Image: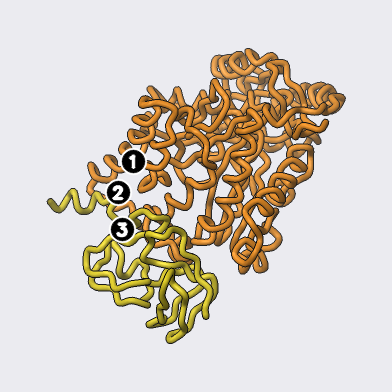
Chain colours: A yellow, B orange
């Protein structure tokens, strides 16, 4: 079982405390999550299916919204999460 | 000596330093060459060069001079030699620092006859100042007189899990002892300001926390730019940090858990004790200059991927929770709290960090001090004319 840290019980992502290989299992609260891909040390893994636009919760707070559907066990990072703060690029496009 | 404290240097204004520097302060960048030469020529001195310092106006000028005077009055400075091109600014800066009661001298390059004469005159003044300062003996100072800055740089996801919680534990002990803590880097409250605001002493402080973050966000929106790319920076992203919200939620942990007493502008000294937020820019040199100018004697600096920068006047303790950084960049690490990722408790790691910090406060050198990874950068707020 690979080592992860879940910082708050509301969280839907966990942080890898070691490199996790695709197919490795992690313990996530009550259940288990299988890594769908490699999760490098310090990066986040989805503990549930996260639909497009869902809030990504870490520390029990929103760290951004899912950009496209994120499968359980997938790596959650800049490629599939949108920050909601300091987005002057959006203000300008409106 | 049973109560926690450190061996420090009592100053005429009642504050206590953890170092006993004679500072050579450039009023503007034209004087940088002279202050650097002088610091190489006279042992026991530290050069404080600056960029800019002429043609600044309005709030930008006010903040710049406040920061310079704040650096001069930092408790770690025993005495100051002010070097300027001309007399008016030399007297103004020296006069403001002298209100603290510490010895201050000044030199105007134009009045003494150029670089060579300024260096000769500066050396003579410094010989007296360093001789006097070196005669001062440290005395036992209670932890209640500590003003501790907390800062992060080269953040990764271990920062919010290990290094920042350990620093926050120490911050709480300092506040509990009656001391003061400055939590800096306002852009790294963004996404976590609701947590800080909930801990605000009153509504005014809560409003000030929200307002400090809103100013940054409004500036991004007014200019039509996305702050991503500027923050989080590439090393944050490589270290697993995805958004500014995630970075901030981890970053504010280093301020501990106590009530937020107030929000300070850049380089402003707190009037009371307890935890204060200081509205500084996030990059390390700029932010730590604000902390030092606000009177911080020491800085605890959490780093995941490693930012090597230390405060020039405020000894800076590098704390990492990343075991790979602790191994690969060991030369730059003061305290490794990565065992927290395994089985070390917060209390154990925090107690180790507090013990090391008090040793630094009593004279033990930090890595950044020994390696000269230290510099000054005063934030700019308006264009120069």
Give the residue at mark 1.
B216
Q: Looking at the picture, how far across and down is residue B385, in whole percent?
A: 37, 29
Q: Residues within 10 Å of mark 3 (few under 14, many from 20)?
A: many
Give the residue at mark 2.
A86
Q: Looking at the picture, how far across and down is residue B339, in whole percent?
A: 65, 63
* Relative side of A35 to B108, left or right: left
Could one spot residue B367 in this view of the protein?
yes
Q: Residues within 10 Å of mark 1 (few under 14, many from 20)?
A: some
* Relative side of A20 to B106, left or right: left
Instruction: State the residue at coordinates (78%, 44%).
Output: B364
Q: Is there CB contact under 8 Å for labels 1 and 2?
A: yes
Residue A82 position by quadrant: bottom left
Q: Looking at the picture, how far across and down is residue B342, in whole percent?
A: 62, 67
Give the residue at mark 3.
A64
Could one spot residue B119 in this view of the protein?
no
The residue tagged with tag 1: helix, strand or loop? Answer: helix
């Amino acid at each position: 079982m690979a080592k992860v840290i879940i910082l708050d019980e509301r969280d839907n992502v966990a942080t890898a405390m070691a490199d996790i290989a695709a197919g490795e299992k992690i313990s996530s609260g009550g259940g288990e999550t299988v890594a769908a891909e490699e999760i490098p040390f310090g990066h986040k893994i989805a503990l549930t299916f996260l639909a497009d636009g869902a809030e990504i919760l870490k520390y029990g707070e929103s760290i951004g919204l899912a950009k496209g559907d994120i499968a359980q066990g997938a790596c959650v990072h800049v490629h599939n999460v949108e920050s909601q703060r300091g987005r002057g690029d959006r203000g300008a496009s409106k | 000596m049973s109560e926690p404290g450190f061996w420090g240097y009592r100053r005429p204004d009642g504050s206590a330093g953890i170092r006993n520097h004679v500072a050579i302060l450039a009023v503007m960048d034209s004087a940088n060459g002279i202050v650097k030469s002088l610091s190489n020529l006279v042992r026991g001195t530290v050069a404080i060069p600056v960029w800019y310092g002429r043609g600044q106006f309005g709030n930008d000028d006010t903040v710049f001079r406040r920061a310079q005077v704040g650096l001069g009055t930092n408790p770690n400075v025993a005495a100051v030699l002010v070097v300027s091109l001309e007399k008016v600014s030399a007297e103004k800066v020296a006069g403001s620092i002298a209100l603290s009661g510490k010895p201050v001298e000044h030199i105007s390059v134009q009045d003494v006859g150029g670089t060579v004469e300024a260096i000769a005159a500066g050396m003579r003044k410094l010989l007296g100042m360093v001789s006097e300062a070196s005669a001062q003996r440290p005395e036992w100072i209670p932890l209640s007189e500590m003003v501790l800055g907390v800062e992060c740089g080269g953040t990764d996801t271990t920062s919010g899990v290990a290094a920042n919680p350990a620093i926050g534990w120490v911050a709480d002990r300092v506040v509990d002892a009656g001391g003061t803590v400055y939590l800096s880097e306002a852009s790294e409250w963004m996404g976590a300001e609701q947590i800080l605001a909930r801990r605000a002493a009153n509504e005014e402080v809560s409003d000030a926390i929200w307002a400090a973050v809103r100013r940054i966000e409004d500036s991004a929106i007014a200019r039509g730019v996305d702050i991503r790319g500027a923050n989080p920076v590439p090393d944050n992203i490589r270290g697993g940090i995805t958004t500014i919200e995630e970075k901030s939620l981890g970053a504010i942990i280093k301020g501990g858990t106590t009530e937020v007493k107030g929000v300070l502008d850049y380089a402003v000294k707190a009037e009371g004790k307890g935890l204060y937020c200081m509205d500084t820019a996030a990059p390390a040199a700029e932010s730590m200059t604000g902390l030092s100018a606000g009177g911080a004697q020491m800085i605890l600096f959490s780093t995941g991927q490693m930012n090597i920068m230390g405060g020039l006047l405020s000894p800076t303790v590098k704390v990492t929770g990343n075991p790979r950084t602790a191994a690969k960049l060991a030369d730059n690490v003061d305290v490794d709290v990565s065992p927290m990722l395994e089985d070390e408790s917060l209390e154990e790691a925090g107690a180790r960090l507090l013990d090391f910090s008090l040793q630094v406060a009593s004279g033990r050198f930090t890595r950044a001090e020994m390696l000269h990874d230290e510099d000054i950068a005063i934030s700019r707020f308006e264009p120069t004319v």
